[in-house]
Amino acid sequence: MILETDHDEIRVITLNAENKHNPFSFELEEQIKEALSRANSDPMIGAVILYGGEGRSFSAGGDFNEVKFLSRTVEIENWIDRVIELYQSVLKVTKPTVAAIDGYAIGMGFQFAMMFDQRLMSADASLIMPELQHGIGCSVGAAILRFTHGFALMQEIIYQCKSLDAQTCSNYHLVNKVVDKDTLLHEAIQEARAMAKFPRTAFINTKTSINRNFIELLDAIKETSKSVHTASFQARDAQKHFCKVLKVKYQGE
C-alpha cells in the first residue's frame, strides 16, 4: 500500500492504497509507521517526503469501510489510540519531513499533514476539516490546530467545515509553499534536500525539542477524544454519513 523510492539522500514514501484518495486503513497506517521508522534509522537517508502519488489525493481521511459501524467503546478507544500513534510516528522522525499535498487532505488527512516539518501543496489541492457537519467529533483536530495556529483560526476551520483552497491555506500559513501540481514532487524533493544539508546534530536536537510538546499534547488529548468520539459514534450520526458516502444500507437503530 506504499511505495518507497530514494532520490539520492531523500526518501519518498508514496501512498498507494487501492482507492486513489488514500483513506487511512489499519494496514496503510501500519505500513506508513514502518516506512517512517525505516527511513529514520537509515544512515543514508537525510530527509523524508510523504506523497499521495501522481493524480491522487494526499489522504481523504479515515477509511469509512473500517469505521462505519464503530459503536462499542473499546473499538472507538482503540481507533483513537491508532490515530494518535500514527500522528506521533511522524513527529518522532528526527530527520526533516515534508508533506507533498495534492488532491484532498480531509479530516485525518489534514491533521496528518500538520505533523510534518514543511508542507507543500499543489495549486489544485484542498484541505478540509468537515467532521462536525457529519456528526463526527473533532477534538483531536481542534487540539492540533490550536497548537499549530492558535485559537481563533482553529475555531474558524473547525466550526465552518469549509474546503480551503491553496491560496487560503497559504494565507493562513497552513502550508509553506503552493506549487504547480506537475512540479509538486520535484519541489518537495528540493525543499527536503535543502533541510537535509543542515548540520545533523543541531537539527535533530532542535526538532526533538520543538516536537516534544506536540507529542505530549497528543497524549494529553487522547482520553478526552475517546469520550468525544464515543459519544459521537454512539449517537449514530457519523455512521449514517459513512453509509451514505459508501452507498450502503445503514444497519443501526
Image (tube, rainbow, N blue to C red):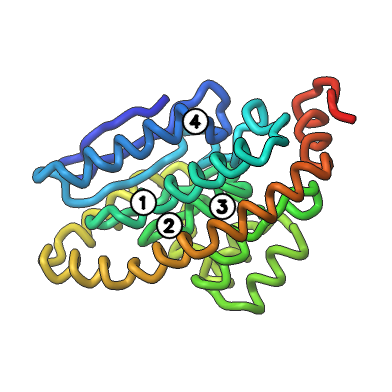
Q: Which mark is residue 90?
A: 1
Q: Which mark is residue 225?
A: none
Left or right of 113 in this view: 8: left
Q: Nearer the viewer, residue 54 or 9?
A: 9
Q: Quadrant of the N terminus?
A: top left
Q: Amino acid at mark 1?
A: Val
Q: Residue at x 52, y 70 (%)?
A: 173
The residue labelled by disc 4 is 26
* For marks 2 and 3 on the same chain, the one whose residue lies earlier in the sequence: 3
Q: Residue at x 52, y 44 (%)?
A: 102
* For marks 1 and 4 on the same chain, the one whose residue lies earlier in the sequence: 4
Residue 104, image quadrant: top right
The residue labelled by disc 2 is 115
Secondary structure category for the residue under label 2 = loop
Label 3, label 4: how far apart the Cα atoms are:
18 Å
Q: Position of residue 162 (x, y in %)?
A: 74, 58
Q: Residues within 10 Å of mark 4 (few under 14, many from 20)?
A: some
Label 1, label 4: how far apart the Cα atoms are:
16 Å
Left or right of 97 in this view: 127: right
The residue labelled by disc 3 is 110
Secondary structure category for the residue under label 3 = helix
Q: Amino acid at mark 4?
A: Phe
Label 4, label 2: how far apart the Cα atoms are:
19 Å
